[in-house]
Image: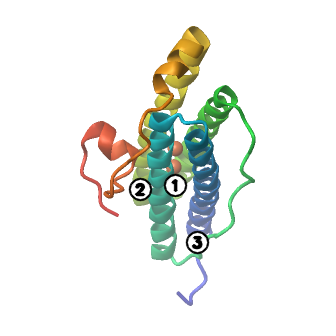
Amino acid sequence: MSQTLSEERQKVIDALNEARGLELNAITQYMNHHYNLAAMDYGDMAAKVKLIAIDEMRHAELFAERIEELGGQPTTAPSGKAVKGLDVNELFSSDRNLEAGAIDAYNRFLSICRENGDSTSAKLFETVIDEEQIHYNYFEIVVDHIAKLGDSYLAQIAGTPSATGIQYQGFVSRQTGAQQDG
Ligand SMILES: [Fe+2]
Ligand SMILES: [Fe+2]
């Protein structure tokens, strides 16, 4: 797009790009945690975190597509560095906090979209916030189980399979049975 973007449109693009940076950070974080959990032999957790990483990849793509539609340039820069070397409890607390941070940020970005008259981008944030909430709920329940049940909970997970199959639908579609494209 050659014409100068309106100030309103630029604010929306900036919000979408900030969200894309958060998604790119979440992808590297969750991929790293998926490998760590697989190495610790917590197969079921590894599989779920891998599927959540795939959801974040889809989010990163959705934000990029909307940025392109608005005439902007999707960022390739993650918002931060992956936190490594956490034990299983710290790992799930850290991921839960990452989701909480994303939900807060996306609610702010949703307001920016509405204030600047972009209901399509606002709707995109609404959809993604709902999915981050599903991720948050999973991480939160694991943190809660570890706190309340400790080793007896972890013993049930140890040795479970980490396979997710060939169809990488992501986490949310499997939890809700919803058909998702893109
Ligand atoms: Fe996401
Ligand atoms: Fe998420």
Res 113 label: 1
In contact (CB < 8 Å): disc 1 and disc 2: yes
**Nearer the viewer's eye, disc 1 or disc 3?**
3
Element type where label 1 sits in the image: helix
- Choose top left, top right, bottom left or bottom right for residue 24: bottom right
Q: Position of residue 161 (x, y in %)?
A: 41, 39
In contact (CB < 8 Å): disc 1 and disc 3: no
Q: Residues within 10 Å of mark 1 (few under 14, many from 20)?
A: many
Name the residue type under label 3: Pro
Q: Is mark 3 within 8 Å of ligand 1?
A: no
Q: Earlier in the sequence, mark 3 or mark 2?
A: 3
- Choose top left, top right, bottom left or bottom right for residue 154: top right
Which residue position is annotated with label 3? 74
Which residue position is annotated with label 2? 119
**Nearer the viewer's eye, disc 3 or disc 2?**
3
**Residue 42 in sight:** yes
